[in-house]
Image (tube, rainbow, N blue to C red):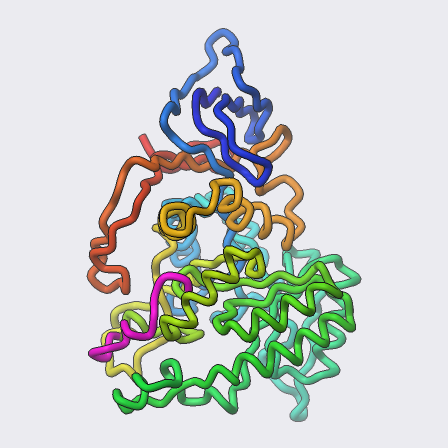
Amino acid sequence: MIIKGAMICDANGEYRGDVRIQEGKIAKVARSVLAEDGEEIFDASGLLLLPSAIDLNARVQDSQLNKKHLMTLSHKAAKGGVGTLALMPDCTPSLNSEVAMELLNTLQNDFHSQILGIAGSTKAIKENGTCLLNDLSILHKKGAYGIYTHSSEDGNLLKRACEFALMLDIPIFLNCEDESLSANGVMNDGELSARLGLPSISNLSEIKEVAMMSEIVRFMGVRAIFQAIATDRSVEILFESKKHNPNLFVQTSIHHLMLTEDLCEGYNTAAKIKPPLKSESTRAKLVKRLVEGKIELISALQSEKSIAQKDLAFEEAAFGVDMIEYFVPMCYTLLVKNQHLSLKEMSKILSFNPAKALNLTTKGLIAEGYDADIVLLNPKETQIIDKEDSPYYNWVLNSKIEKVFHCGKKIIGE
């Protein structure tokens, strides 16, 4: 098959051309590709051709790991232009078992987007009051692409998890939060939380843990992904640390770049996510850091919650947001239309950087030999988000996905 006449956009540049897809791979990229006898041709004139986005921070619905929820997650991701997902292990049952990893492997051919398992650093149970390290080498052999750990983990176990990450050449995913400072908190600490009478989460909960973990990562020299960073000071700390360890990646969520804590007015549980939404001044600073290149990864922070877990009093409602099916158009609206970044810069953030962080050597670019995970985006179309339970209800997005290909197979679009 040949996709003809699209504006090809990836981290290497933007130009009009053709792409040939064969056996799930990109076989040729050129200004013009001549069709062979009987070869299917798709006219993509007026469309943007991008490598599918890669999201390194996803969770299944209600944190319940089963086939139905995995299939739903992969389908929603594909609709949003996300071709690859890193699934966090904090679900039930957890991914910290060979059986769970094998479930992912078994379903890969049925997924609309690839879902990669991330192993937790420690076992869910404690023996004799001591937390034990998981069998990380075995989980890696079964398909784990990284190690997830929490900054509150025992220091020796953190060090050992880093050693395994180095030995296996996989990244460590870091959740930085001081739970003693954030315990029982449900929204950002500030004037609004005080007025609403809601327990809050201090920025210090993240900042102090980021400072500590940045030193551990620097000392160990491990490839690290700092997940869902939501404060400007944390970004400053990590930018300095990156000078000593270039294999450090800073991630934030699209929601912390587009939304503010003001959405919590009226005790709106659709805006209850973790980390909590911040003030307008913090949102603006995070956008500035992204434009400067100090934030390299964006996540949809997918963590769908059922109505039964959201339609409650604010303090009792679950943290979570379900917006991955709009992810690439949301990013295009923010980055290209509002912040005037180039398509090359957007593709680098959404595809090239996460592929590099996860060492996915055949993803993230439109180039010969790469997986044919492709999104065709129409920049002239608009769409209105009509999900009433969404924090983006009635928002207008400045682009629309026309077609999505996964491993060369068309899965979204007529």
At x 67%, y 69%, the residue is 240
Instruction: Kindly identify the residue that appears in the image at 71 percent across and 59 percent down.
Output: 246
> Toward which corner of the image does residue 403 lie, by quadrant?
top left
Q: Is residue 381 magenta?
A: no
**315 displayed left or right of 128:** left
Q: Position of residue 388 (x, y in %)?
A: 20, 61
The answer to whether residue 123 is left or right of residue 220 is: left
| Percent of width and height locating residue 232 | 51, 72
- Quadrant location of the C terminus in the rendered image: top left
Question: Compared with residue 289, is residue 107 higher up or lower down, i.e. above or below?
Answer: above
Question: In the rendered picture of this protein, how many numbered marks are placed on residues?
Answer: 0
Image check: 412 left or right of 107? left
Q: Would residue 147 be seen by someone viewing this image from the given angle?
A: no
Does residue 154 appear in the picture of this structure?
Answer: yes
Horizontal placement of 219 versus 327: left or right? right
The magenta-colored residue range is 257-268
Is residue 373 positioned above or below 154 on the image?
above
**Residue placed furthest toward the top:** 37
Q: Nearer the viewer, residue 247 or 71?
A: 247
Instruction: Estimate the x, y position of residue 196 in percent, counting from the top left.
Output: 26, 87
Quarter assignment of residue 212: bottom right
Residue nearest the viewer, comparing 133 with 271: 271
- Most common secondary structure along the magenta stretch: helix
Residue in view at x 49 percent, y 64 percent: 252
The answer to if 267 sits in the magenta stretch is yes
